């Protein structure tokens, strides 16, 4: 899924080259993960667009973003690139060939596919992230069944993946903001099940206040 911009801080910080592992493959960002800056040698085989090499760091290095963060990492940013929702250039189609597709077909590539760059948001504000990009641990996970989560609860970024979690992990995970609530996708275009039968709502996003320095 993706990061959902509710009341973000004016504009993103910018677009920066993402490590290949974040752009493609099973560990690619879904949108909403926390990332930070890092550097690699310009001779590193990690792919990047030509303009990335217009800048440099000492010792012949260049800048990348990574989801490997820590409690001392600065700055912390959110990536909005994903494979659906905000992160898809051309949206989705329901119906497909002779109307037989009901789940929707994603059109267009991952937004980092062409340039390898990830859009990073660093401003404090209100954001939502799809639950598939959150910590799904059954005990401490960021999910609707978590009894310890309440409005104002501290949220952290998992140190090795950047996904949101309420677990501080003994101080290893950096603080990134405060939990607000869980919400549906807000769509009434197709009738939700809960409007016609007594079933539980299906939550899609976790809404949070991103403010890693507050």
Image (cartoon, rainbow, N blue to C red):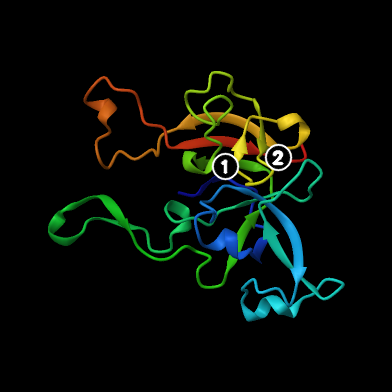
Q: Is residue 209 left or right of residue 142?
A: right
Q: Earlier in the sequence, mark 2 or mark 1?
A: 1
The alpha-carbon separation of the residues under discs 2 and 1 comes to 10 Å
Residue 11 appearing in the image:
no
Q: Nearer the viewer, residue 141 or 114?
A: 141
Residue 101 position, x and y percent, is 21, 53
Q: According to the image, label 2 marks what residue? A: 211
Residue 166 appearing in the image:
yes
Q: Residue furthest right?
A: 58
Quarter that holds the C terminus: top right
Q: Nearer the viewer, residue 88 or 168?
A: 168
Residue 198 position, x and y percent, is 26, 19
Circle 2: element type? loop
Residue in the image at 60% along x and 39% along y: 164
Residue 90 position, x and y percent, is 38, 63
Q: Which mark is residue 127?
A: 1
Q: Is residue 11 left or right of residue 30?
A: right
Residue 110 position, x and y percent, is 47, 62
Q: Are marks 2 and 1 in contact (CB under 8 Å)?
A: no
Q: Is residue 170 left or right of residue 145?
A: right
Residue in the image at 40% along x and 39% along y: 185
Circle 1: element type? strand
Could you tell me how many numbered marks the image carries? Answer: 2
Residue in the image at 53% along x and 51% along y: 31
Q: Is residue 43 left or right of residue 23?
A: right
Q: Quadrant of residue 118?
A: bottom right
In the rendered image, the vertical position of residue 171 relative to residue 107, given as above or below:
above
Q: Quadrant of residue 70?
A: top right
Q: Nearer the viewer, residue 180 or 41?
A: 41
Badge 2, how many Cα within 10 Å: few under 14, some, many 20+?
some
Q: Residue furthest left?
A: 98
């Amino acid at each position: 899924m993706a990061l959902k911009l509710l009341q973000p801080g004016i504009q993103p910080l910018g677009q920066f080259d993402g490590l290949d592992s974040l752009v493609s493959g099973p560990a690619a960002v879904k949108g909403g993960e926390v990332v930070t800056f890092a550097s690699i040698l310009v001779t590193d085989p990690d792919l990047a667009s030509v303009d990335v090499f217009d800048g440099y760091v000492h010792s012949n290095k260049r800048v990348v973003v990574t989801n490997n963060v820590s409690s001392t990492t600065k700055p912390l940013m959110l990536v909005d690139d994903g494979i659906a929702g905000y992160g898809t250039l051309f949206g989705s189609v329901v119906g497909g060939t002779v109307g037989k597709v009901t789940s929707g077909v994603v059109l267009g590539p991952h937004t980092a596919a062409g340039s390898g760059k990830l859009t990073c948001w660093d401003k404090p504000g209100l954001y939502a992230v799809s639950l598939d990009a959150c910590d799904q641990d059954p005990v401490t996970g960021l999910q609707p069944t978590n009894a310890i989560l309440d409005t104002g609860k501290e949220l952290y970024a998992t140190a090795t993946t950047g996904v949101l979690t309420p677990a501080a992990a003994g101080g290893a995970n950096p603080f990134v903001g405060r939990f607000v609530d869980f919400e549906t996708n807000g769509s009434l275009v197709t009738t939700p099940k809960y409007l016609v039968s007594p079933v539980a709502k299906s939550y899609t996003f976790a809404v949070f206040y991103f403010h890693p320095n507050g």
